[in-house]
Image (cartoon, rainbow, N blue to C red):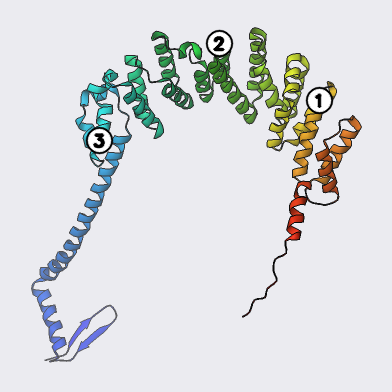
Amino acid sequence: MAMLTRLTSNGTTTVAPGSPKGLQRFQNYLSAFLWPGTSHRQQRKSSSQSDAIDCFTNELVNRKTQKWEELRDNLMKPVSEDAAANKGSSNFGQNVGLMSKGMVNDLKQLRSPQLGLDIRSLSQPQLDNLLLATLEVKNKVDFLYLIRQCVRWQQLPCNEVLISCLKYLSGLGRMQQLDSLAETCRQTKHPFASIYSDLAPFKAIALWHNGNADVALMTLHRGYGGSLNSEEGRRMIRTAFRTIAEETLAQKSEAVLISLTEVARAIHREHKDIFVLALVWKQCFASTWFSDQKSAEELFEHYKELQQLVERRASPLCSSFLSRHNVDAVHRLIEVFLQHNQRIACSSCLSLLFNYQYMRKDLRACAEIVKSCSELEMPLSELQNEQFLSLFLDRNDPFETINASAAIKYKPKSFQYKF
């Protein structure tokens, strides 16, 4: 039997006749020649098995992914009243099938058309608890749904919960819901309609967050007079003015500052209330911008009531500046007091400034304050003089001398470590 030679891509392979290995290869070649489909079917069979496993795995993963995506989209989709009335509560139970049974029942009761269209079946504590629960987890969809039902059936929560709801709506900038609640308060003769002057502070903050600065200031201006009739209304509308003033100076908005100043002047002219003017003056005075400081100077020179108010509240005002480490504002405030011969206010500011610099162990600043007090004939207290001397002599605090002497008297026993 002649030698068998097989051509390959690398060369030729020679197999000795009669060897088992060579015989097996010869049989394989012969089978491939006589039945060419056999080897291909075997390869196709193994490849088809691996392809089937891969397809099954991919299909399973895709099915799981699609299932979770559909569930998430359905849960995130807002539920409208019409859609809820048409579809019923069965679809909602299917969407949240993976949740606990108790949570599903609670949400079904919350969004059920039969119950949602008539929340009068809920008691006042139940309504309050539902609203507080949605506020706590910031569930905006369910919260707005409950607010719509409260407006529809004119059933409002208790005053504390209603205040929380109004603040949350103003933070979201939801003017439509605030207008609806204001109308409901008027129709039901709720006390908030008069206390907060048709919910003016909350509407103004919502308008401010929506970018309508001029309309927000106009709303506060119109509602300011009505809010002065009660302490709570006065506090709330002044808080709204303070928020707008602080954010105006923080954003360096010159146009809004001019509008705010005009509203403050108008409120003082109509209601003889200096608070808003004082608020604008303080924010401008504490600013690092020269234009804001000039606006504060003009207001201070024009209004005698503002000068008297600042003089009376010199110590709290100075402490407020120092708490923010605004030493420059304190220096300018002292200059203003000296210009208007307000010596008592100037002396209290110098004393507070000395305490601030002494706590920072700034000897040079303390020396300048002591020198200024001596020249202005506004002496510091005896304790402050002792503190300055101790700082000058590089000694401890006078109050700590007793403790230091006691510590010197106590001597611990000497000992040695033995290793």
Q: Position of residue 342 (x, y in %)?
A: 82, 22
The mark nearer the N terminus, 2 or 1, is: 2
Determine the image quadrant of residue 86. Answer: top left
Tell me how far mark 2 sits from mark 3, CA to CA. 47 Å
Which residue: 64% across, 12% down? 267
> What mark, if any, has residue 229 been given in the picture?
2
Query: Which of label 2 and label 3 is nearer to you?
Result: 2
Query: At numbered mark 3, what does the secondary structure look like: helix, strand or loop?
Result: helix
Amino acid type at mark 1: Ile
Can the viewer see residue 295 in this picture? no
> What mark, if any, has residue 362 been given in the picture?
none
Tell me how far mark 1 sits from mark 3, CA to CA. 68 Å
Tell me how far mark 2 sits from mark 1, CA to CA. 34 Å
Determine the image quadrant of residue 388. Answer: top right
The mark nearer the N terminus, 1 or 3, is: 3
Query: Which of label 1 and label 3 is nearer to you?
Result: 1
Query: At numbered mark 1, what does the secondary structure look like: helix, strand or loop?
Result: helix
The reply to whether callout 1 and callout 3 are in contact (CB within 8 Å) is no
Q: Position of residue 292 (x, y in %)?
A: 72, 26
Q: Sort mark 3 into few (<14), some (14-19) or many (20+) by Cα contacts within 10 Å.
A: some
> What mark, if any, has residue 104 been given in the picture?
3
Which residue: 10% across, 78% down? 30
* Residue bearing the label numbered 1: 344
Amino acid type at mark 3: Val
